[in-house]
Image (cartoon, helix red, strand yellow):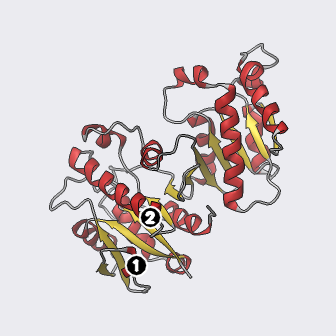
Amino acid sequence: MLKKIAITMGDPAGIGPEIIAKAFSNPEVRKACLPIIIGSYNILEEAFRVSGQVFRINVVTSAEQAETSTVGMNLIEAGTLSGFERNRPTAEGGKAAVDCIEKAVDLALRKEVDAVVTAPISKEALKMSGYPWPGHTEMIAEMCGTRDYAMMLSGSPLRVILVTIHTALKNVSGLIRKESVLRTIRLAKKACDMLGLSDPKIAVAGLNPHAGESGIFGTEEIEEIVPAVEDAKKEGLPVSGPYPPDTIFHKAYRGEVDIIVCMYHDQGLIPLKMICFDTGVNVTVGLPIIRTSPDHGTAYDIAWKGLARPSSMIEAIRLASQLRT
């Protein structure tokens, strides 16, 4: 039986509705799962028109009513806007995006859908709407009542999982603690289990150049990261490191490592986006539900012009259909 996957429309002013429409034109998407869009009828209808796609929109009120079809798109209405501004963040757009996410997460928590795929939202629009979250990851974790979670980014052949997520670089050193590194190593093993890897290899990146060079370039490795790795080994976790950040990604690229525990956002995302900018997928690990997302933003500058590429959305849907809880 095909898995039911709720796909949120994202910020209506951005490329989310468009990449959803284009993803539906890929027959592999409909073979992989039974997609159910969570969003506004008017916005999705316009997105299909702009994208040059022809699909019948099947409005349903529950996931149970969703139909398998090669010409129809199942839609549960949420985040409805009669009119909306395009190509820029607005409070209305931020609220509509959150309404869709809340509906999708609720469906997943009630086991009415098997996974959630979220189209891009705007952190600025969230702030304009009065919401406190810095992004999708923190928002969905709170909705799920989850405290231990991490952002994993996947793009063949790299997978990275982050100790710190959305924070200023000047704050990172103070957030690197043995407990947070150990927690992320454990979540890295959970990510490998979700992916069905039977003999995973987890590598930990250092924070400083040369992984601190025995304390010459910083002591975070000696004081926090190494103790976390040692404790993880005692728990039987398949982990090694810390490795110099300028070499470990090459090892992963060559297939010697399955996932890298990275100390901060850009440490992991710069190499990953360098090699798979159009196909990277964001996975929130540690939730009671499966959640994936394209690894890109709202791209306001090209939205609603028929230019957005759906590659990352297609991969996010495909991965969501494969992951295990």
Quick one: quadrant of the N terminus?
A: bottom right
Answer with left or right where residue 6 lies relative to residue 151: left
At x 27%, y 63%, the residue is: 78
Quick one: quadrant of the C terminus?
A: bottom right
**Front label number (2 vs 1):** 2
Residue 114, image x, y percentages: 51, 68
Q: Quadrant of residue 192?
A: bottom right
Note whether 230 is above or below 293 in the view shown.
Answer: above
At x 54%, y 55%, the residue is: 288
Alpha-carbon distance for marks 2 and 1? Answer: 12 Å
Relative to the observer, which residue lies in front, 283 or 48?
283
Answer with left or right where residue 201 lies relative to residue 85: right
Residue 163, image x, y percentages: 62, 35
Answer with left or right where residue 47 lies relative to residue 109: left
Relative to the observer, which residue lies in front, 47 or 239?
239
At x 66%, y 59%, the residue is: 194
Identify the residue position indicated by label 1 in the image: 64
Note whether 202 is above or below 244 in the view shown.
Answer: below
Residue 235, image x, y percentages: 81, 40
Say whether disc 2 or disc 1 marks the residue closer to the N-terminus: 1
Amino acid identity at mark 1: Glu
Amino acid identity at mark 2: Arg
At x 80%, y 34%, the residue is: 241
Q: Quadrant of residue 198?
A: bottom right
Q: How crowded is the residue under tag 1: few (<14 C-alpha within 10 Å), some, or many (20+)?
A: few
Q: Give the SS element for disc 1.
A: helix
Identify the residue position indicated by label 2 in the image: 110
Q: Residue furthest top?
A: 216
Q: How crowded is the residue under tag 2: few (<14 C-alpha within 10 Å), some, or many (20+)?
A: few
Q: Quadrant of residue 290?
A: bottom right
Residue 133, image x, y percentages: 38, 39
